Amino acid sequence: MADLTSITQAKLTAFKKDATPRQQLGCDKISGFFYLKLAQGGAWRLRYTDLLGKRRTATIADTNIKPNQAAAEAISWKAKLREGIDPLSYKESLAQTQREEEQLKAANVYLKVGAFFESIYTPHKIDNYRYGAGTLKGIKHNFSHLFDRDMDKLNSADILQWYNKRRSKGIMRSTLIRDFGAFKAMLNYAAQPLRGVSEPILKVNPIKNFTLPALTIKEQDDLEEHNAKLSHQRDIFSDDVKQQISKGLVLYADSLKKKRRSSIAHGKSHLINLDNHTYPHWFIPFCHIARLTGMRPSDIYALKWENLLFNQFNNQTTLIFTPSKTKKSENSRKVKFPVTGELKFVFDSWAAQQEQAKSGLIFKSERTNKAIERKAHLRHWKQVKTLGGVPESLDFYSFRHNFISALVARGVPVLTIAGLVGHKDGSMIAANYLRHDELSTESLLISISDDWTLNTNIKGKNVSF
């Protein structure tokens, strides 16, 4: 094969040895084609006039390419010019296409449900949501069997199969709705552009418009029965239950003090004597706060001393916080709860035991000095119920129900109650708590009946209407 260029390998070798940086070795056969010596190596270049008449110089090959190969590339570029194609723009276009393909390939890695969950969604939930870890745990528990699938290949059959399997195990409808909603929310997040990325990983959420099947007749009956039980849980505590709770808390405190005295007597003299402590355990003031405010346990765990604001002008303290369930934006609604009476005593007493703490978490682990695990109260609540004879079925969350129901029974305006318990409006309270007292209702019905009682003698018979 004839040489395409006048630059032979021998000439190139000699030029590389003797030339100084930026010197050029030109070709006599191909106009504008030359080798450029650089401080480190060199490059094959082509000088040409583009389609707009502008002189341009392009690198067409690196120093490792032999002269004939570089010449062939130069001839190819000139052929493109004759075809009306700017070779440099063409090269840049190819490079851009390659970069986009590589980016797409990299992005496609995260199309896998599991890869997106672990690498992108998990940090997002942990960094931006107080209890994102719980949501992540639920997604993994319910949908890990789909982690090897591509998100854009999921379909309604996948969700229906999961739904039927979970339903057959007796999982509550409300739980299924919650779990499916969490998974759908993850796909919705994948279908929106992430920060710093122009294109979303998932073009369209394939299950965006899918809804869970309607309830069967049996499920409707089960749901009504469940709602009836919930309705009873929202009733006001009876005096007996209140007495049992008080008794349980007192006995629990006494038992903790007794155990501490025993530990000290058996060689653990470094331990603090709890006999003079109002609250020998964090759960006791925790329980009182739940009782006196109706706060969700998660919000009590998150309380900081900074949430208690003292107004020196009216000598009043206010508890100000944003409920975790609504803490999603800068404009989230804040709860402003007056701290007076017994509630103030609880906070003051606990602060005194914490050496008049003024900052940081109100309830924190003595071991780690960090937040307490958010279900830790349940173990202590179980012991209090046992000691006080409290019905086993009474859930700790019932303190919130009792608080709301008690305010409703006292005729407090629904919107006022909503503000105290962190609801954005009064609709939920009106739907679930706005019930008449059963005894009052009974007396009302009797009085209406009495209004229609007429003693009339018809044909010698006494008839009442």
Image: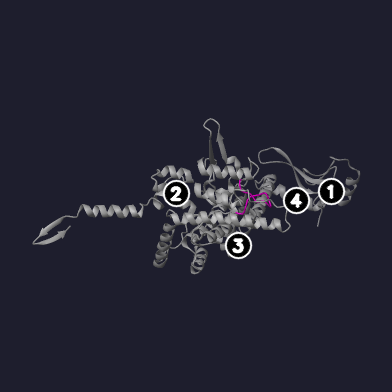
Identified by mark 2, the residue type is Ile
Q: Earlier in the sequence, mark 4 or mark 1?
A: 1
Q: Earlier in the sequence, mark 2 or mark 4?
A: 4
Q: What segment carries the magenta color?
A: 362-373
Q: Which residue is mark 1?
A: 7
Instruction: Compute the Cα span from label 4 to label 1.
Output: 14 Å
Identified by mark 3, the residue type is Phe
Q: Which mark is residue 73?
A: 4
- Work out whether 422 lies above or below 388: above
Instruction: State which mark lies toward you, 2 or 4.
Output: 2
Instruction: State which mark lies toward you, 1 or 3.
Output: 3
Instruction: Compute the Cα span from label 3 to label 4.
Output: 47 Å
Identified by mark 1, the residue type is Ile
- The single residue placed furthest to the bottom in the displayed view is 168
Q: Quadrant of residue 255?
A: bottom right
Q: Which residue is mark 2?
A: 404
Instruction: State which mark lies toward you, 1 or 2.
Output: 2
